[in-house]
Image (cartoon, rainbow, N blue to C red):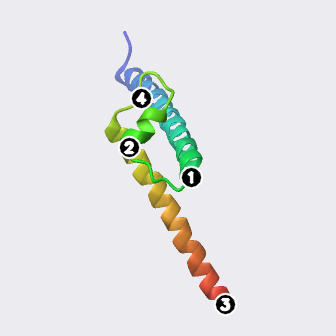
Amino acid sequence: MKTDEEIGRAIRHCLAAQAAANRAAGDALRAEVRAVLDQHETEGQRLTGKQVLKCLTRNPLPSVRRVQEVLQEIRAQSSASRIEIKHTESQNV
């Protein structure tokens, strides 16, 4: 029979593996959404979550809500980096 410590260790190991798999899946989705955005935003379009979802090739597709969350993250990072660049440029002038 396993001790409580061994059981706890096994559970933490399983949870750590699950967390790593979830992070990898999230990173892959962000990369795929970013690729779709890069492809279409050069054409001057600002895509919605549903439009991005139609361009994704994965099976099964993520929910529209998840794609919208990823879009928000990407756009927030993008605008934050633009603000930082403008701030740096204004200090250099």
The local secondary structure at tag 3 comes to loop
The local secondary structure at tag 4 comes to helix
**Marks 4 and 3: in contact by CB < 8 Å?**
no
Label located before the other in sequence (2 or 3): 2
Disc 2 versus disc 1: nearer the observer: 1
Whether residue 63 is situated above or below residue 73 in the rendered picture = above
* Residue for badge 3: 93
> What distance separates the C-alpha of mark 2 from that of mark 1?
17 Å
Label located before the other in sequence (4 or 2): 4
Disc 3 versus disc 4: nearer the observer: 3
* Residue for badge 2: 49
Q: Amino acid at mark 4?
A: Leu
- Which quarter of the image is occupied by the N terminus? top left
Q: Amino acid at mark 1?
A: Glu
Label located before the other in sequence (2 or 1): 1
**Relative image position of residue 92 (x, y in whole percent):** 67, 87
